[in-house]
Image: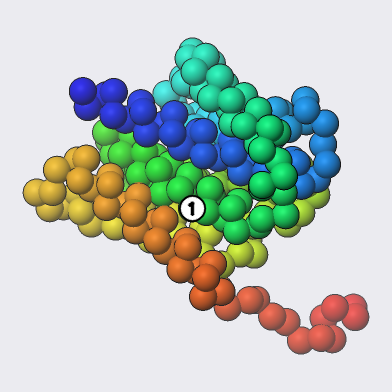
Amino acid sequence: MHDTILYGLDIFGTFIFALSGAIKAIKNKLDILGVIVYAVTVGCAGGIIRDTMLGATPVGVYTDNMYVVVCVIAALLVIFFSKYVVGRWSLIVYCDALGLGVFCALGCNKAYAMGVDVIGIIICGMLSTSGGGVLRDLFSREVPMIFTSDFYASAGVIGSILFVLLTKTACPEMVIMWLVAIVVIVSRIIGYKCRLKLPVARVPIEVYKQ
């Protein structure tokens, strides 16, 4: 039962990230194949990065067809309902928020189960949430949202730290994962709604002229 729930969450997170990739592809006016490639790449990247970092190879995408299948389904759904999603940036943000929360909780939990130390858990939780989004933005020739947007990577860091702290308590594993996922999702949405951002690194204007 426990493994089934974790697997279901992994598939759900993959589907959500695939939706965001497909929506971005439609926005960039790609053909049907391009939309599917975006969806598969963005949907699977987080899990591939997570499993590769932890040495859990071959990664799940290569041994379970369901990951690619749900990405293709997500792409087709977006294609069929494109008139309802094109131009709605907030929809991408909300899909990202859901994917961030799920993959942060899964990444941290898998790292913890494999005996990774505190820093490793935090890094795994943060990077497993951002892989798909980074590839999506790079494909679109944009600066990845993780480097510029309101509480993107920061939400993953917050969730990862919360996971580490909760593992020191008697809180059940699944409760910890749900709490982490919810905190990450809420943090990301609040950051988007309130336009919260970390301070931008600034240098004197003279430096740009050199």
**Residue at 64% over, 64% down:** 148
Determine whether 7 is above or below 151 in the image.
Answer: above
Instruction: Classify mark 1: residues with Cα within 10 Å, few (<14), some (14-19) or many (20+).
Output: many
Residue 123 locus on image (x, y percent): 44, 48
**Foreground pick, 90 / 51:** 90
Which colour scheme appears in the figure?
A: rainbow
**Residue at 73% over, 82% down:** 203
Side (left or right) of 155 relative to 203? left
**Foreground pick, 72 / 77:** 77
Which quadrant, please, contains the N terminus? top left
**Residue at 78% over, 28% down:** 32
Determine whether 22 is above or below 64 in the image.
Answer: below
Query: Tag 1: residue type?
Result: Ala
Residue 99 locus on image (x, y percent): 48, 44
Q: Which residue is mark 1?
A: 97
Element type at marker 1? helix
Q: Is residue 102 visible in the rendered structure shown here?
A: yes
Determine whether 90 is above or below 198 in the image.
Answer: above
**Foreground pick, 199 / 34:** 34
Side (left or right) of 13 relative to 169? right
